[in-house]
């Protein structure tokens, strides 16, 4: 029971770490203006509206890694042979992504990929469940 309760926070933490690492790499190559990093939402909106494709795509890459790692971690921690914990992580990340996309002027391709990518939690979960059977 405790494992299933801790599975979702563990998956979320693993996913946030992935997003943070990939976005930091993206910010090294495509640095946002200093005002955007200080919590100035106006500066961040301005940056996103004019950011090059790869600057935004790094966010999607972070989401891809986060979805797989989050689903894997949640399913491993839950250790119940089900995708439930991974699905909960995916839904939470999806809501956070949609909120962010409403807050910032993201292009339509970002909306499409930003929504679809969270289905990859099931790929991570499936991998975790498959590893459980082979070990």
Image (spheres, rainbow, N blue to C red):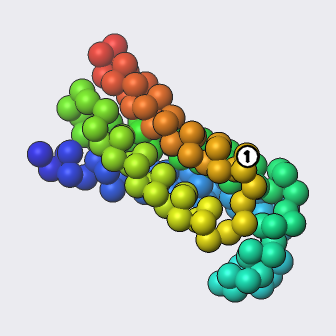
> For this rendering, which residue is in front, 1 or 88?
88
Q: Is residue 103 above or below residue 93?
A: below
Residue at disc 1, secondary structure: helix
The image shows residue 16 at horizontal and vertical percentages of 51, 57
Quarter where residue 132 is shown:
top left
Q: Position of residue 75 (x, y in %)?
A: 32, 36
Count of labels shown? 1
The C terminus sits in image quarter: top left
Identified at 73% across, 46% down, the residue is: 109
| Residue assigned mark 1 | 109
| Residue at 65 percent of width and 50 percent of height | 111
Residue 115 percent across, percent down from the top left: 56, 46
Horizontal side of 20 relative to 86 (left or right) equals right
Q: Give whichever of 126, 73 is nearer the camera.
A: 126
Please give left or right for residue 132 compared with residue 115 in the image: left
Up-down: is 3 above or below 24?
A: above
Q: Residue at x 48, y 52 (%)?
A: 94
Q: Residue at x 20, y 45 (%)?
A: 4
- Dot 1 alpha-carbon crowd within 10 angstroms: few under 14, some 14 to 19, many 20 or more: few
Q: Is residue 58 visible?
A: no
Q: Is residue 134 left or right of residue 17?
A: left
Q: Quadrant of residue 92?
A: bottom left
Question: Image height check: is 122 above or below 131?
Answer: below
Q: In the picture provided, is 76 more to the left or to the right than 2? A: right
In this rendering, the answer to whether 14 lies above or below 106 is: above
């Amino acid at each position: 029971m405790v494992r299933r309760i801790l599975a979702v926070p563990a998956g979320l933490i693993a996913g946030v770490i992935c997003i943070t690492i990939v976005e930091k790499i993206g910010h090294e190559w495509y640095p946002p203006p200093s005002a955007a990093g200080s919590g100035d939402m106006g500066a961040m909106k301005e940056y996103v509206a004019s950011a090059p494709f790869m600057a935004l795509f790094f966010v999607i890459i972070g989401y891809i890694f986060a979805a797989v790692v989050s689903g894997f971690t949640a399913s491993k921690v839950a250790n119940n042979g089900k995708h439930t914990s991974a699905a909960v992580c995916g839904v939470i990340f999806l809501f956070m992504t949609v909120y962010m996309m409403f807050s910032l002027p993201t292009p339509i391709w970002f909306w499409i990929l930003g929504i679809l990518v969270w289905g990859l939690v099931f790929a991570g979960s499936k991998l975790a469940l498959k590893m459980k059977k082979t070990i």
